[in-house]
Every structure is written in C-alpha cells, then in structure tokens.
Amino acid sequence: MPLAFELLLLTVVAVAPRPNAVPLADASAGAVRVPSKPSAWGGPRTGREPTLSDRVANYRLEAVLDPVAHTITGKEQLTWRNRSDLQIASLYFHLYLNAFEGPGSTFMTEKAQYGAFRSGVSTKKGEWGWIELRKVQQRGIDLPWVFVHPDGGPQTDHTVIRVDLAEPVAPGGTAVVDIEFFDQLPRVVARSGYFHTFHLVGQWFPKIGVLELAGERGATAPRWNCHEYHLNSEFYADFGSYDVSIVAPREYVVGAVGEEQGAPREVPFGLEHRFKQDDVHDFAFAADSRFRARPVSVGIPAGGADHARGDARVAGLLLAHARSVPVPDVDGGGAALQCHRGRRHGVRDLLHLGRIQ
C-alpha cells in the first residue's frame, strides 16, 4: 500500500463519526432464510411504469486508464434516493478493490483458510490492487468516513466504509455525493485486474450498499446491507442509471456495459468513450490493444426482458437488446463484448475470461 494511502487512512480513522440510527446488517444477512414479502421493493413491476426498474442509485463516472501502470484515476457523482420513512444520516459504501490490497483482507484471509480460488493463481509481490479515496463531498463539504467491519472480519479489511453526511436525507429525498478516487488494479483475480495489455475493470468504483426495508430479504426494519468482500459471495446492489466516460489510449479497444454514445472523442490522453445504460446494478469495462472489433448480429428471444435482473459485473456481459455489437478478437485468451446500440432491456450472456485468469 502506498505511503500516501497510509497517511490518508490515519487521518480518516482519527475522525469520530456520529452514530447511525439505521443498523448495519451482520454476516447472518448474507444468506436469505425468510421469503421476501410480495410488496418488497415496491412489488412486482407491471411493465406500465415509466422505467424498467425502480432507479435508486444513479452514477455518473469518469475513468482515465493508464495501461502501463495499470491504474484508474476516477471521479464519481452518486445520486441516491432514500426509499425509507426515516431520515438517513450516514451512507455505507463498498470499496471492493481493497480485497486485493494484501493478505490481511477478508477475501485473502478466507482464501488462505479455504484454499485456492477458481484458477489457483496466487497474487505475488507487486501484483496487489487497491482503491484510494481522495475526496468525498456533499454540496462541496468534505465528509468524514471510517472503515467498518459488518461481518466481524479482520480489522485489516478495508472493503466497507461509512460516510457521515453533512445534510441528512429526508424520507423520499435524495443525496448527491461527489467522490474522487484512484485505483491500482491487481493482476487479474476474481473478475478484475490486468494481464499484460488486457484490463478487466470490475468492482472498481465506490459503490453504495443497499438500504433494505421491512419485508425485504428477511429485514424486519430498515437496515443497511453492505457486506465485506468475501471469497465466496456475489454482489448485491440497487438498480439505477449509469453514465460513464472512459479515457484510454487510442490503440485500445474498449468494451463496456451499455450503449456507446457516438464515436470516441479525442482528448489529451487518448480517446474518450462514453457509455450509458439504464436499469442495471453495476458497470464494468474491458480494454486491450489486442482487441479487434467486428460487428455481429444478436437475436433476443421473447421474454428477454426477464433477464434484465442479471449481473452487470463482468465486461463481456451483453446488457442491452443489442442490434449490433463488436466482438473483440483476442490473441492469447479472454473475450469481451461491447454494446454499441440497444434497447432498454437487458440479457444475461457471459463470456468467460478463463485463459486470462
């Protein structure tokens, strides 16, 4: 971990945030044991709503990829809606990349305990990855934040934080949080990282947890569900809209969730690609100088909209009803899809990156 991050960590921990009235779910909430009520998350969608999903967490993201240093310099503007009837004074976020900052994370301690994860590839010195928070603000006011451990994991785990707001969010109201961050990508592990020129950028931005209401996944009252990043677990988030700008070198082909908004734009550091996608719960992208894009036609069977609840966490997911997508031709393993044009529903097609990991 860089010295700069260690100093930042010491500064943040010294802050004493005020207690949050809404509890944080512990490890027992990771597995559903009680069926959710029919009214959970607003009840079944009828198809007559103005949006496909109940958009709770909307993200505007900016990423500049340095493929030599394998880093991302990022900005985020999160607009989050309070679905509860309580005033919310604090928000919880995942910092997933910190699972790969060293052997002391929850992920790595569980890997040491239970053995190899999927490929069996170990992370060596110089291959660790992490995320640094450089600024967290609400209406221009710096916000205090602190690492928390909802599942009782080691104190050396830094995958969940609590942010105390300058202005609490009223019932039904929204909060806008501006964040600046920096990612050091790890060598590819657990669906994120680099391998030579290949970059799979997943779980890369500060991501808000889920405020569950009574009747949702066994909750009896409002609670935050924001677990540490475990070895064997999946990702859980509210649906929303994503508007993402990605800057990569000119020779790099970028594949991402969503619909690309026209041709890439020339900027000082390369080409800026902009993608937008509504009604998904994550955003990932892949970039490689060896990718070659070629158009293909994709047919969507009737009922494809039922798959819109699928994951967006892997660059290579086709998240639009695509009329045309370029499929990268990769020399040496791995593949990803780039959605250029699409309708608003999603499907759940995964292309595996097996030979990369």
Image: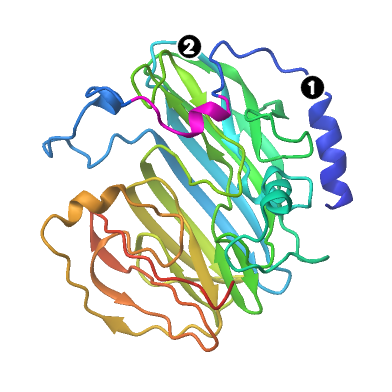
The location of residue 147, given as percent across then percent down, is 71, 31
Figure quadrant of residue 323: bottom left
Using the image as rendered, state which of residue 281 and residue 247 is in the foreground: 281
Using the image as rendered, state which of residue 87 and residue 29 is in the foreground: 29
Q: Dot 2 corresponds to which residue?
A: 87
Please identify the residue farthest to the bottom as the structure is shown. 331
Q: Earlier in the sequence, mark 2 or mark 1?
A: 1
> For the point 22% across and 24% down, which residue is it?
38
Figure quadrant of residue 255: bottom left
**Amino acid bearing label 2:** Gln
The location of residue 121, given as percent across then percent down, is 67, 69
Q: Is residue 121 above or below residue 280?
A: below
In the image, 16: left or right of 272?
right
**Amino acid bearing label 1:** Val
Q: Is residue 112 above or below residue 179?
A: below
Q: How many neighbours does mark 1 have within 10 angstroms: few (below 14), some (14-19), or many (20 or more)?
A: few
Quarter of the image with the C terminus in it: bottom right
Q: How many neighbours does mark 2 have within 10 angstroms: few (below 14), some (14-19), or many (20 or more)?
A: some
> For the point 42% across and 81% down, which residue is it?
328
The location of residue 55, given as percent across then percent down, is 33, 36
Q: Which residues are magenta?
A: 26-34
Q: Dot 1 corresponds to which residue?
A: 15
